[in-house]
Amino acid sequence: MKYHIWTEGCQMNVADSQRVASALEQLGYQADPDIEQADVVVLNTCVVRQSAEDKAYGRLTSLAPIKRRRPDLVINLMGCLVGVKGAEKLRAKLPYVDVFSPPSEPGPLVRFLAERDGRDLAQAETAWRFAYQDEVTSVLNPRATADLVLPAAQRGSLVAAQVPIVYGCSHACSFCVIPFRRGVERSRPVGEIVSEVRALVAQGVREVTLLGQIVDRYGVDVPGGPNLAQLLRVVDTVEGLERIRFLTSHPSYMTDELLETVAELPKACEHIEVPVQAGDDEVLARMKRGYTSADYRRLVDRIRRILPNASIATDVIVGFPGETAEQFDRTLALLADLQLDVAHLARYSTRPGTVAERRLSDDVPEVEKMRRFRALEDLQAQVVAGINARLLGQTVEVLVEGEHKGKWKGRTRSNKLVFFTAPGEWTGRLARVTVTRASPWSLQAEPAGRTAPSLALPVAA
C-alpha cells in the first residue's frame, strides 16, 4: 500500500503533512512520489492567497480522472481549504473526495482507513501513539506525543524540523483568513512539546522551529500558562538539540523578556521573523494590525539593541485596498531605512469572509500591484546584497542540512543560506566555514582552515 502527499503553504502545513505521513506509515503504507501509483492521496491545502487556492483546485481537478479509473483510490482533502467548520459545501462540489480533514487534524483520514479496513480503532490509536479528542469540532484531532515517529524517508536524515506549539489565531487582521480556517488559538502543553522535541532529536533532528500563526502569543489562551520565553528555556535543556528557532512573531506581542531570553540561551538562534505588512499608518489601521510604523521602527531598534547580531525578516503586502502611491512609497522608505535581511512580499488578494472582503474594495489594479511588488523586490535585492557582502571573509557556523547539486547546504544561526564543498559526510553536522562569495540569496564558503570541523556532530541513528 502506498501514499502520496502534496503540501502547499506555510511551515505549519509542512508539519501537519509530516504527521499524516507518520500515521499512514504506522498503518503500513509507504511513500511514493508518483501520484499515479498511490493508494491514498493527501492534498494539504493553503488559501492565504488566491493563487494557492487556485493551485489546490487545479490539483483536485487533475485527480478526478484518476479516481474514475481507480475507484478504490482514497482522496483526502486537508488544510485551510477545508477549514475548521466542516466541509458540507465542498462535499457537494467534490463528490469524488473521500475524506475532508481540517487543518492539523490527520484523524479523519486515519479513522476512515481504520473503519474501511476493519481495524479496531481503539487498538489502532494505541499503536499510533496519538490522542484523538476534539470537543469543539467533534472530529479526531491527533496531538503528537513522545512517540512521534518521523516518516521513513526522514528518519536519521532530517536535520531541521517544525514543531507546532500554538494552533489557530485570535488576532484577526482584516486581510487574513486564518482565524476562519484554523480557528481560535490553542496552545499545546509544555510537556507535550518537549516530548516531541526529544523524540525528534532521537531520530537525528538537530534544529527545531517552534511554530504559531502568532508564536509570541503562546500560552495566552491558558490562564496562568507559560509564555514563549519560558517555553524556550525548557526546550533549550533538551540534550542533543543544537538550535531553536520560532516564527512567526507579531510586533504587538514581542516583549523584551522574549528577546533577552533569546540573547541568553545558547541554542536560541539570533533570527527574528516579525511582519510589518505596510509602512503607512492608515493602511496599517485598515489592516487592523494594532501598531504604527513608528512602533515597528522602535521594535527593530529594540531587537538590534538586545540582539546586535540578529537578522530580521518581515512580510509586506502591496496593493491593500485603498493603498495610494504615496502610502506605498512610505513602505518603500521604511524598508530602505531599516535594511532588513529578508522581506517576504505578496500582492493583496481578497479572501472570502475576511473583514477586508466585506468592507473594503480591492481597488488597486493588478498591474499597479505588480509594479509595487517589483519595486520592493528590487530594493530588497540591493539591501540584502549589501548586508551579505559584509560577511565576506568572515567565519560562520553552519548547520548542514544536506547535499544540493554537489555542494553541502546549510544555514547560519542568523538563517543565512550557505553552500560549501568538502569531502566526507556533513549532514547534521556543525561546520565552521569562511565566506568566499556573497549574493542577495545565498553565501558560498569553504571550510575554515580547510580542516575537518571541530564542532562536527554525528547524526543519531
Image (cartoon, rainbow, N blue to C red):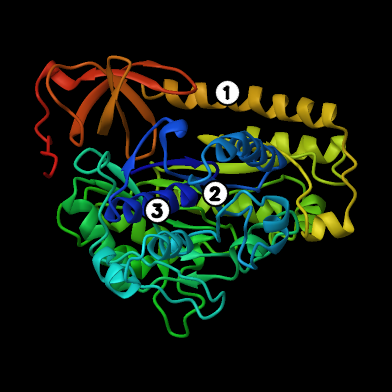
Q: Residue furthest bottom?
A: 223
Q: Position of residue 262 (x, y in %)?
A: 35, 56
Residue 156, placed above or below residue 163: above
Disc 2 residue type? Val
Task: Describe residue 88's horizontal placement relative to residue 427 as left or right.
Answer: right
Can residue 256 be seen by looking at this rendering? Answer: yes
Task: Describe residue 292's horizontal placement relative to residue 426 as left or right.
Answer: right
**Nearer the observer, disc 2 or disc 1?**
1
**Observer-nearest of 150 and 404:** 150
Q: CA distance from mark 2 to mark 3?
A: 38 Å
Tell which circle, 2 or 3, labels the residue nearer the N-terminal end. Answer: 3
Identify the element where label 3 is drawn.
helix
> Which dot marks residue 20?
3
Disc 3 residue type? Val
Residue bearing the label numbered 2:
300
Task: Describe residue 34's horizontal placement relative to residue 85 as left or right.
Answer: left
Q: Residues within 10 Å of mark 2 (few under 14, many from 20)?
A: some
Q: CA distance from mark 3 to mark 1?
A: 37 Å
Q: CA distance from mark 2 to mark 1?
A: 20 Å
> Which dot marks residue 196?
none
> Which dot marks residue 381?
1
Q: Residue at x 69, y 38 (%)?
A: 54
Tell which circle, 3 or 1, labels the residue nearer the N-terminal end. Answer: 3
Q: Residue at x 34, y 70 (%)?
A: 230
Q: Are marks 2 and 1 in contact (CB under 8 Å)?
A: no
